């Protein structure tokens, strides 16, 4: 098979491209930096993220002083070939403030920062649902289904997981895709309730899956 030629990057007038760094496990956008040809080459050869510092006018490796290196899992270029996407595994907080990611300031309707720090930008819909579950546990809300489950205790939550797992089996047997989607969504929600009950984070699940990614063979019985 003929190998595709290397992309012809469209650098700006300073010879730079913006590089978006994304957590390879949950898709969170960790930071934005800039790369020139040298930084791209260094990133590719070392498998660690390198940028070009516009303020210091030199090449630098992310984490060279803090130790919070970004290990490269994959690289992509966009359709216009003027932006790089780096999927990476972070060895510690990415932001210089000590936060996991740099995007923790929400904008209000006027486009102003609200002043509160949040990691709500991290992850996707599953993270958002789990954050709501944890909020309902900390601050019960009248009429909330989630609050009622917590009030019912651990056994009620586990019973719902078992029930929804059975519904998934029946839907799969029936073969109707829309029913399978509906029941799997129910099962996922109630599984998230288990994580919320035990004060666990989805990122812990992603890390466990990350350890298994690319490995074959049966799991060793405990």
Image (tube, rainbow, N blue to C red):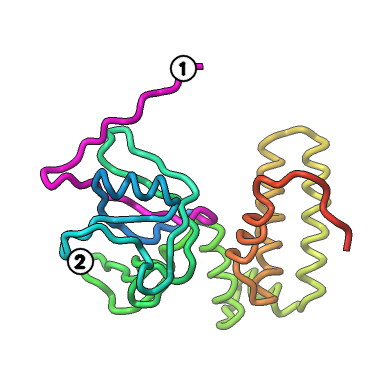
* Dot label at residue 32: none
Up-down relation of residue 193 to residue 37 (above or below): below
Q: Nearer the viewer, residue 181 or 90?
A: 90
Q: Is residue 87 left or right of residue 160?
A: left
Q: Residues within 10 Å of mark 2 (few under 14, many from 20)?
A: few
- Give the Cα separation between the discs numbered 2 and 1: 52 Å
**Residue in view at x 50 percent, y 53 percent:** 24
- Label 1 sits on a secondary structure element that is loop
Tell me which numbered mark, 2 or 1, is placed earlier along the sequence: 1
Q: Which region shows up in magenta?
A: 1-26
Q: Relative to 105, is 178 above or below?
A: above
User: Tag count in the figure?
Assistant: 2
> If the image is split into quadrants, where does the C terminus sit?
bottom right
Q: Is residue 27 above or below residue 178?
A: below
Between 53 and 140, the one lying in front of the other is 53
> Are the residues at dot 2 and dot 1 in contact (C-beta closer than 8 Å)?
no
Q: Position of residue 90 (x, y in %)?
A: 47, 63
> For the residue carrying disc 1, how many other residues have a C-alpha within 10 Å: few (<14), some (14-19), or many (20+)?
few
Residue at point 31%, 50% (across, down): 19
Furthest toward the top, the residue is 1
Q: Could you tell me residue 146's position as x and y percent?
A: 64, 70
Give percent across and percent down for residue 68.
43, 69
Residue behind mark 2: 110
**What is the x, y in percent for residue 49?**
38, 55
Q: Secondary structure at mark 2?
A: loop
Circle on res. 2: 1
Specify the quadrant of the image occupied by residue 172. Answer: top right
Determine the main secondary structure of the stretch shown in magenta.
loop
């Amino acid at each position: 098979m003929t190998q595709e030629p290397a992309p012809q990057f469209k650098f700006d007038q300073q010879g730079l491209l913006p590089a978006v760094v994304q957590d390879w496990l949950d898709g969170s956008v960790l930071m934005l930096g800039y790369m020139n040809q040298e930084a791209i080459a260094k990133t590719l050869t070392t498998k660690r993220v390198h940028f070009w510092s516009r303020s210091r006018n030199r090449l630098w490796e992310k984490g060279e002083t803090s130790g919070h290196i970004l290990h490269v899992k994959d690289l992509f270029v966009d359709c216009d070939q003027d932006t790089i996407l780096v999927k990476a595994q972070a060895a510690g907080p990415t932001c210089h403030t000590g936060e996991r990611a740099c995007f923790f300031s929400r904008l209000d309707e006027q486009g102003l920062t609200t002043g509160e720090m949040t990691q709500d930008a991290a992850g996707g819909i599953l993270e958002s649902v789990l954050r709501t579950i944890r909020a309902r546990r900390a601050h019960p809300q009248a009429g909330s289904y989630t609050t009622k489950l917590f009030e019912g205790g651990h056994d009620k939550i586990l019973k719902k997981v078992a029930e929804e797992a059975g519904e998934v089996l029946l839907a799969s047997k029936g073969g109707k895709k829309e029913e399978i989607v509906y029941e799997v969504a129910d099962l996922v929600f109630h599984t998230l309730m288990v994580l919320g009950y035990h004060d666990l984070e989805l990122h812990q699940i992603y890390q466990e899956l990350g350890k298994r990614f690319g490995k074959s063979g049966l799991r060793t019985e405990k």
